[in-house]
Amino acid sequence: MNATEPPPAETWAWAVERPGPVGGPGPGPLVWERRTLDAPGPREVLVEVEACGVCRTDLHLAEGDLAPRLARCTPGHEVVGRVLAAGAEVEGFAVGDRAGVAWLARTCGRCRYCRGGRENLCPDSRYTGWDRHGGYAGRVTADARYAYRLPEGPPAEELAPLLCAGIIGYRALERADLPAGGLLGVYGFGASAHLTAQIALARGARVAVFTRAAAARRLALELGAVFAGDSYDPPPEPLDAAVLFAPVGALVPVALAALDRGGTLAVAGIHLTDIPVLNYRRHLFQERTLRSVTANTRADGLAFLAEAARARPAVHVTRYPLRRADAALADLAADRVTGVAVLVPE
């Protein structure tokens, strides 16, 4: 941070004091405070934050769409940093290593979902920036078993969005069952969508983007989309698959109606406004499928990071100083961020 930063046992951090609207008059939901850190446990690492992506889930937490599960929780689950200390039982990390702290923070390891390779459905799962303090801070602790080793070369602010926007987008793309060479519809074009679209393009797919933001439509075309229209525009041809990133339930019937026979719509968000009544023949008949996406497994994370290293998607970053995290969330809420917002230390 600077010459007056606290000693290693303390950090500066943002906390959700009272969930409520961001960017309005008066004090917002976030407060900037000094916090004492617990020493890392036997399987934990203490990480000095180099960058933290700003995710729409953080906005849902701050505004109360997600009920708080930790008092004065610090948001942020796209954390890139350096290991400052490691517990006695930590494997795979040493002091000085670059580490990524992501959304999935812990699972039980014993339930049928964990044993069956579906740990994202673990009833006892815990999440960074919701159940434990996240990366809107100078330092953060994490269970090393759920952290990722990251390469040294890329800038931290370009790696950070991969840790949730990228991983969740990857799982959503897998859930959408896009056939080889097919046309993928992408509804909403923020942090996750602009990375997912590039992965789909690298796989040989065509991509049609639907978003209300003109700047996002321009970015989509620059990245290689064959079509970029408003959220409610019809596609140029029936879609083979689609992913809904915008947290807008009214877009579910729109996207389903745009699917070709046998197509699948995957809903990628953790929060969605109410879905209107569906018409069976128009929206689901002819074997159209509607699927949700719930978190991710560590295997998803490893697979995506390996694919991203090969595909090298362009990460369009808007940088904010850590002390302006409240402004970053306000800009995200108002659709003033093109690509992804990332917090960096002052």
Image: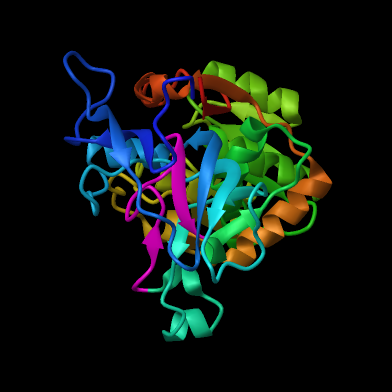
Q: Is residue 80 left or right of residue 68?
A: right
**Is 103 located above or below residue 317 in the figure?**
below
What is the chief secondary structure element of the magenta stretch? loop
Magenta stretch: give its range. Answer: 123-143
In the image, residue 188 sits, relative to residue 149, either above or below, namely above
Residue 262 in picture, x, y percent from top left: 60, 63
Residue shown at the point (48%, 51%) measured from the top left: 268
Drawn side of residue 155 relative to residue 62, left or right? right
Does the segment drawn in magenta span residue 130?
yes
Decide which of 137, 306 is in the foreground and name it: 137
Query: Where residue 284 sits in the image (x, y, percent)?
Result: 46, 61
Where in the figure is residue 183, as x and y percent of width and height? 70, 46
* 68 w.r.t. 289: above or below: above
**Is residue 186 visible in the rendered structure shown here?**
no
Q: Nearer the viewer, residue 214 or 84?
A: 84
- Tell me if residue 43 can be seen: yes
Of the pair 105 and 198, the residue shown nearer to us? 105
Q: Residue furthest top?
A: 25
Percent coordinates x, y for residue 157 in the rendering:
62, 31
Q: Residue at x 52, y 35 (%)?
A: 53
256 part of magenta stretch? no
